[in-house]
Amino acid sequence: MQVEVTTWYLEMLDPDQLRPRLIEHPDLEIRQATVPCPELSRFFYASVGGQWYWCDRLPWSRDRWLTYLTSAQVETWVAYIAGTPAGYIELENQSGGDVEITCFGLLPQFMGQGLGGHLLTVGVQRAWQLASRRVWVHTCSLDGPFAYKNYESRGFTLYNTKINTEVLPDQPPGPWPGYNA
């Protein structure tokens, strides 16, 4: 099917723009995945983004994932609740002092609990440890209904909007073939 997709590009130009949202949760832990693991990253990409038409990386081979993840510029941070992976944020340190949030989101069963604001806050704080110029992200009209609002609430400001027509499958891919939410 053909769909008109709006993509919003947001940025933060100073760490003081961050409006943190941290929650108290005794079982919440956020840790960096320091061992490049294509299986873990593909799991998050498919499980977090599958309901939102995240399709670009699904055809990647294991070698392509590994090459991407072994880059010194890429960091993956994982949120756990009671030892169970709940979501992730992926950062890419780019030339010129920019850090892009390349992927961010929660597994469906962990949405609506305030974890997204917390994980984004921790991720942006880490991004500013790496960045000297700006932290940026893009989201689109296919993404989760609270994605844009979370970025905006944390202090990101819109700097560009693009509208494209994209050809998508009739249903989002889900976390695995045949998945029906």
Image (cartoon, rainbow, N blue to C red):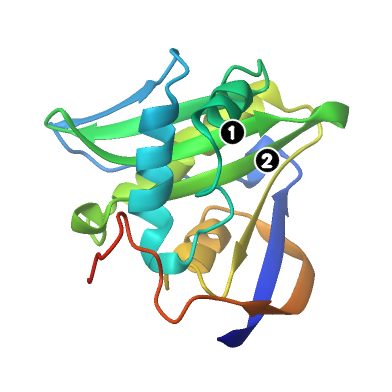
* Amino acid beneath label 2: Glu
Residue at 62% of width from left, 22% of height from top? 67
Residue at 17% of width from left, 38% of height from top? 25
Examine the rendered structure and indicate whether residue 30 appears above or below residue 24: above
Examine the rendered structure and indicate whether residue 132 appears above or below residue 149: above
Q: If the image is split into quadrants, where does the C terminus sit?
A: bottom left
Residue 88 in the image, given as x and y percentages of width and height: 40, 39
* Residue 21 appears in view: no
- Left or right position of 2 against 108: right
Q: Earlier in the sequence, mark 2 or mark 1?
A: 1
- Left or right position of 5 against 180: right
Local packing at callout 2 (Cα closer than 10 Å; few below 14, some 14-19, many 20+) is many
Residue at 55% of width from left, 47% of height from top? 57
Q: Which residue is mark 2?
A: 100
Q: Secondary structure at mark 1?
A: strand
Residue 176 in the image, given as x and y percentages of width and height: 30, 55
> What is the distance, in whole Å, between disc 2 and disc 1 at their CAs?
6 Å
| Residue 91, numbered circle | 1
* Amino acid beneath label 1: Leu
Q: Secondary structure at mark 2?
A: strand
* Residue 61 appears in view: yes
Of the pair 149 and 8, the residue shown nearer to us: 8
Q: Quadrant of residue 99?
A: top right
| Tag 2 and tag 1, C-beta contact below 8 Å | yes
